[in-house]
Image (cartoon, rainbow, N blue to C red):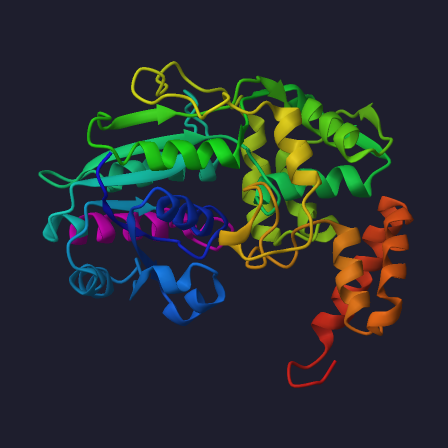
Amino acid sequence: MNTLRTLVTGATGYIGSRLVTALLAEGHEVVAASRNPNRLADFGWHDEVSAVELDAHDEDSAHKAFADAGSIDVVYYLVHGIGEPGFRDADNLAAANVAAAAKAAGVRRIVYLGGFAPDDNSLSEHLTSRAEVAAALTVDDGPDVVWLGAAMIIGAGSTSFEMLRYVADRFLLLPMPEWSANPIDPISIRDVLHYLVAVADPDVPAGAYDISGPDTTTYGDLLRTYARTAGIWRTPVAVYGIDTCLVSRVSGVVLPVPGGLAGDLIESLDYPMMASKSGLGDHVAEPPGGLLGVEDAMRRAVSSPKRRPVNALADEHHLADTDPQWAGGDTRRLRHLASTVTPSAVQPVLRLIGIVPGPVAGAVRTGLDTVIGMVPKGSPA
């Protein structure tokens, strides 16, 4: 593939920040777009990219961003407001604005990463929104659109994976409602990046493609696999009469993941999340060595070392220093908090925090985070 000039929306997000790294590694030029370009300075690749200010929800901002960016071959659309009030209408508007601006700027292709859209008339708002965004990005005589659909993405820092981590870490008895047996085709972050970079190639036909790893599993089995790879003992317990709406409402209380974000994702578990037959196999080769299975991907995520700049990660599954502070598990969070008030000479002792039982670590971490959240921002604490 020839060198392309790409514009990455959502460049400061989990996927976007790793995608910038992957595109640069393949020799492509990258323009990183953000509502607040000053945030881009936090990322290790900052000096290797161009930056533009882009608020996708503002039509004028979208057009100005493309004018400032100059000639662009491919736009990566990674914008979403899931977890925020009214995100569905806001996401549709943002997609339409970017599509119109890209058309005016002569962009050839838009690559959009969304979710699977199962054939069901009563989808969750999250799943319905993903399909609507793909439609909004498709405009007459505009850029062609490649829509990649994915289910759970496995990697430290991924919201879906972090939710799974906290459930397994914090509960000795793993609740298994009826919907935990729904089939799901997860994919590793490494393989997501492989496909995102590959479909920029104009030889890949425009269209909708589902991407997934080699294993079909269930949400319940994902919990079991996580517990096994993390080396913790957990017992699954069948429970009945608990629907995803109820779980989504209490998720913000029992998990450190932002409540609205977790709630919208949980409601999607009501549906089988299996890849369709419209895969990329005829157009894109698998990554060297083949796709990663669930257990291999989870082992890489669980073994994440200390946070590093996103462009210096030894493995895409590891946690970056720009990933959300709530990510990474309770033990990691407690070590970080302890290290800020502990003399460096005794910090090796902090490894003992790892022997604290998961439910206890979760309770302590929740208490400390609550206290910290109550401290005025100007306080030295």
**Horizontal arrangement in the rendering, residue 9 relative to residue 214 (left or right):** left
Q: Residue at x 61, y 45 (%)?
A: 318
Q: Splitting the image into 4 quarters, where does residue 378 fall?
A: bottom right
Q: Residue at x 19, y 51 (%)?
A: 72
Percent of width and height locating residue 25 = 39, 45
Q: Residue at x 86, y 60 (%)?
A: 348
**Horizontal arrangement in the rendering, residue 181 relative to residue 315 (left or right):** right
Percent of width and height locating residue 20 = 39, 50
**Horizontal arrangement in the rendering, residue 239 relative to residue 33 (left or right):** right
Q: Does 320 sit above or below residue 43?
A: above
Percent of width and height locating residue 123 = 46, 30
Q: Does 365 sit above or below residue 152?
A: below
Percent of width and height locating residue 37 = 37, 68
Magenta span contains residue 338: no
Q: In this rendering, does residue 232 appear at all?
A: yes
**Front residue (pair 254, 168):** 168
The kind of secondary structure the magenta stretch mainly shows is helix
Residue range in magenta is 78-101
**Front residue (pair 158, 299):** 299
Q: Does 45 sit above or below residue 176?
A: below
**Front residue (pair 194, 88):** 194
Q: Residue at x 24, y 26 (%)?
A: 204
Quadrant of the snapshot with the C terminus: bottom right
Magenta span contains residue 92: yes
Q: Splitting the image into 4 quarters, where does residue 370 fall?
A: bottom right
